[in-house]
């Protein structure tokens, strides 16, 4: 089920690591970059709830979630292929909108697909495997331009984009499509128990009915989801600080390159992608270590601990000027990244109604997309007027956000763990009077 995430995250990884640098190559100033990043959160706000709600009401010969996965993958492939050939800034910005809309449409079906096909007791491992593939895809994407350079690829496009980045995007386009096809062709979905009732619901929610149902679900959002919304918002605001400015920060703060057109700046951007690959590789191991920690402690504590590790890692960059030490700061970010893509969804899947799993999972993406919009609108004046156009401070702001989100996890109620605790207490009371052979 999760192989398609390799290609999806390869596409996201290329975008997160290199889009800011591509924008600068095409003439964007650092303070303009946040506005150009509006595509990702805006399209996520549109795609995730729409695809989630529609897929809940869909059944075709290839299932419920897979038709949306396949359609998004085809468009994403085309956008990734064309992106590095952008002749002007406006072309790259337009392609990013198309790319993000299609990637979000492909990404959304994966989480309800896991929840649909696995029992509740299997979901922690299921989402951990999902996190593993996400980390592997991102790591592969981040290091590919660097290894292409080691393999002897040199030169630039007419717009100044390194050929290492161009070829990585071109490979990513086909890799995205191939892995998505793997999931579509090898995964089965259980048909609905009452197909006629599903068809009737589908007709009732067409047009205006779709909006009516969406706002009805929004007003009945489970309390745990409301509490998690605050944590998600702050977490993802911090992550967008990193996505937008980590590569330019590496070039300036660690490599000392101030000119985006210089060869030294290119090396700094490539090294920034390599460092991001470190957190992706760390997340591979963390994906299977975190469920063990959750079993020994709690899911809430595990997520809070992981977020704190990421915050400390990002704040420590202030003291780092060596390119190799910079890699160490990404260890904590990798632990946080792994948990961000697993624990919230494990907890949510235990409180959401199965018939509305896709809709609520898509709605939860509001709290991923909205901080991206806020970051795009606020980081530009913040960087220009308060941070003296120094991206280092934006990355450190991201670290502070992860620490704050860690503290706020104390407010989140996990009913799944509460049930487990009550069960354990009941078992303890029941067995307390037993002795000897009876207890054995």
Image: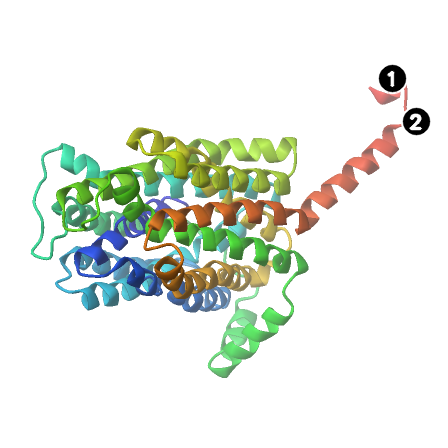
In the displayed image of the protein, which residue is found farthest to the right? 433
Res 384 quadrant in image: bottom left
Left or right for 42, reference 202: left
Q: Circle 2: is it few (<14), some (14-19), or many (20+) Cα within 10 Å?
A: few
At horizontal 30% and vertical 31% (from top left) the residue drawn is 322
| Residue bearing mark 1 | 437
| Residue bearing mark 2 | 433
Asked whether 61 or 248 is in front, the reply is 248
Asked whether 252 or 71 is in front, the reply is 252
At horizontal 87% and vertical 33% (from top left) the residue drawn is 430
> Which numbered disc, 2 or 1, marks the residue closer to the eye?
2
Q: Is residue 194 above or below residue 213?
A: above
Would residue 440 be visible to someone looking at this image? yes
In the displayed image of the protein, which residue is found farthest to the bottom? 208
Would residue 122 be visible to someone looking at this image? no
Q: Circle 1: is it few (<14), some (14-19), or many (20+) Cα within 10 Å?
A: few
Percent from the top left, x then y, of residue 145?
20, 41
Percent from the top left, x then y, of residue 429?
87, 33
Percent from the top left, x then y, of residue 198?
53, 69
Asked whether 136 or 196 is in front, the reply is 136
At horizontal 87% and vertical 17% (from top left) the residue drawn is 437
Q: So how many labels did they put on this image?
A: 2
Asked whether 382 or 115 is in front, the reply is 382
Q: Is residue 420 above or below residue 211?
A: above
Q: Is residue 413 above or below residue 137?
A: below
Percent from the top left, x then y, of residue 231?
57, 53
Left or right for 50, reference 94: right
| Secondary structure of the residue carrying numbered label 1 | helix
Q: Quadrant of the C terminus?
A: top right
Q: CA distance from mark 2 to mark 1?
A: 12 Å
| Secondary structure of the residue carrying numbered label 2 | loop
Residue 344: mark: none
């Amino acid at each position: 089920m999760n192989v398609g995430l390799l290609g999806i995250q390869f596409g996201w990884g290329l975008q997160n690591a290199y889009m800011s640098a591509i924008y600068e190559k095409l003439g964007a100033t650092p303070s303009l970059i946040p506005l150009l990043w509006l595509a990702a959160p805006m399209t996520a706000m549109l795609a995730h709830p729409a695809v989630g709600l529609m897929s809940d009401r869909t059944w075709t010969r290839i299932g419920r979630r897979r038709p949306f996965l396949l359609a998004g993958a085809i468009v994403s492939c085309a956008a990734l292929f064309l992106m590095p050939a952008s002749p002007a800034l406006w072309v790259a910005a337009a392609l990013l909108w198309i790319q993000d809309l299609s990637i979000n449409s492909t990404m959304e079906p994966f989480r309800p697909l896991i929840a649909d096909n696995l029992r509740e007791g299997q979901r922690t491992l299921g989402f951990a495997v999902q996190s593993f593939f996400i980390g592997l895809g991102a790591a592969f994407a981040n290091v590919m331009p660097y290894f292409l350079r080691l393999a002897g690829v040199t030169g630039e496009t007419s717009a100044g984009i390194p050929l290492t980045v161009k070829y990585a995007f071109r490979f990513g386009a086909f890799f995205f499509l191939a892995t998505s096809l793997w999931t579509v062709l090898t995964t089965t979905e259980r048909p609905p128990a009452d197909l006629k009732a599903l068809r009737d619901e589908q007709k009732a929610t067409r047009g205006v009915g779709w909006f009516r149902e969406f706002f009805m679900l929004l007003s009945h959002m489970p309390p745990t989801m409301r509490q998690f919304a605050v944590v998600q918002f702050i977490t993802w605001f911090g992550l967008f600080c990193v996505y937008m400015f980590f590569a330019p920060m590496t070039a300036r703060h660690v490599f000392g390159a101030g000119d985006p057109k210089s060869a030294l700046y290119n090396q700094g951007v490539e090294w920034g992608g390599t460092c991001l690959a470190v957190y992706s590789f760390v997340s591979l191991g963390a994906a299977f270590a975190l469920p063990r920690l959750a079993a020994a402690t709690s899911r809430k504590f595990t997520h809070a601990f992981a977020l704190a590790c990421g915050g400390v890692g990002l704040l420590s960059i202030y003291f780092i000027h060596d390119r190799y030490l910079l890699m160490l700061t990404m260890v904590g970010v990798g632990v946080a990244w792994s948990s961000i893509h697993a624990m919230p969804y494990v907890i949510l899947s235990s409180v959401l109604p199965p018939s509305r799993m896709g809709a609520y999972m898509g709605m939860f993406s509001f709290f991923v997309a909205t901080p991206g919009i806020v970051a795009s609108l606020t980081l530009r004046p913040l960087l220009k007027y308060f941070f003296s156009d120094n991206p280092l401070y934006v990355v450190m702001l991201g670290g502070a956000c992860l620490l704050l989100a860690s503290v706020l996890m104390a407010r989140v109620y996990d009913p799944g763990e509460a049930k487990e605790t009550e069960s354990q207490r009941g078992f303890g009371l029941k067995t307390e009077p037993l002795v000897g052979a009876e207890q054995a």
